[in-house]
Image (cartoon, rainbow, N blue to C red):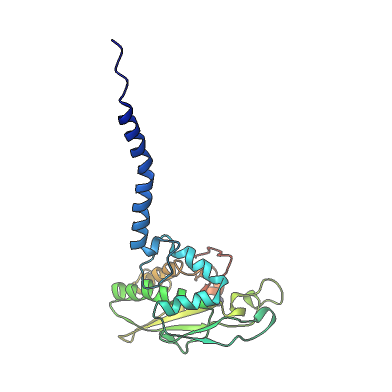
Amino acid sequence: MPPAAPNPHFRAARRALFALVPLLLAIAGWQWLQNHPQHNPWAPLDLRDPPGWATRTKLARLKEDVGACRAVLARSDIVFTALDAAGEGECARPDRTRLGDYPLSPDTPPVTCPVAIALELWRRDSVAPAARRILGSDIARIEHLGAFSCRRMYGASEGRWSEHATGNAIDIAGFVLEDGRRISVLGDWDGEGTEARFLREVRDGACKSFATVLSPDYNAAHADHFHLDQDGRWSGVCR
Ligand SMILES: [Zn+2]
């Protein structure tokens, strides 16, 4: 006796079920993304969300759009001032954004909005926790050597313009802790002590939000500071 042919109703039901699987998966995936905006490339960026798969892509998009970038600062409850454009030619600065509540010292210079966002993420996700964990104190001040400087790279008379020429970079020289200790890139980078460990960790941490990070490991010109910038080409140098 030949095997009985499958019931046509059963076959139709099975086909319908298989057709539903991708749809159900898509719905589940969409719902999951709604609950995890940090992984959702379509969700508006809010810096209060933990970092996720989509964070870097969203940050990169902001480099082309000052308005969208400042909207992220506002949405994330970060105090800032939007300053008037300044300069011209290679040193034109259409985006001068000053963080209002950031422990930079001796002052808080205007930077581009993408640099402001990266500074905020760096302080919150790397510098503050590393200081507490490794050095046992909170950060009082982050010392810098300047952001804007209308010059080419390394101050040369020709060649590529520095990211500093548009305020799209900042040089960090050291950190002052709440307990009064001061950790400097120049004085504490070498060795295996806790200060050196802290500096290496926050250097690596900066690479999560800045496009380019240059430290004493990169070359002698950076023996006394970390150069942090938001080069639109995302050089990816982190050394
Ligand atoms: Zn620099």
Q: Is residue 116 visible?
A: no
Q: Is residue 220 visible?
A: yes
Split into 4 quadrants, where in the image is the N terminus?
top left
- Measured from the top left, where is residue 131 in percent x and y? 33, 76
44 left or right, relative to 67: left
Which quadrant of the structure image shows residue 190? Answer: bottom left
- Measured from the top left, where is residue 179 in percent x and y? 30, 85
Residue 134's place in the image compared with 4, above or below, is below
90 left or right, relative to 66: right
Residue located at (55% from left, 76% from top): 66
- Measured from the top left, where is residue 180 in percent x and y? 33, 87
68 left or right, relative to 49: right
Q: Which of 55 and 147 is in front in this view?
A: 55
60 left or right, relative to 198: right
The number of callouts visible is: 0
Residue farthest toward the right in the current orientation of the protein: 158
Residue located at (33% from left, 62% from top): 35
Residue farthest toward the front in the current orientation of the protein: 9
Q: In which quarter of the image is ligand 1?
A: bottom right
Residue farthest toward the top in the current orientation of the protein: 1
Q: Nearer the viewer, residue 187 or 49?
A: 49
Residue 235's place in the image compared with 187, above or below, is above
Residue located at (48% from left, 66% from top): 58
- Measured from the top left, where is residue 216 in percent x and y? 50, 71
Q: Nearer the viewer, residue 204 or 92?
A: 92
Which quadrant of the structure image shows residue 176? Answer: bottom left
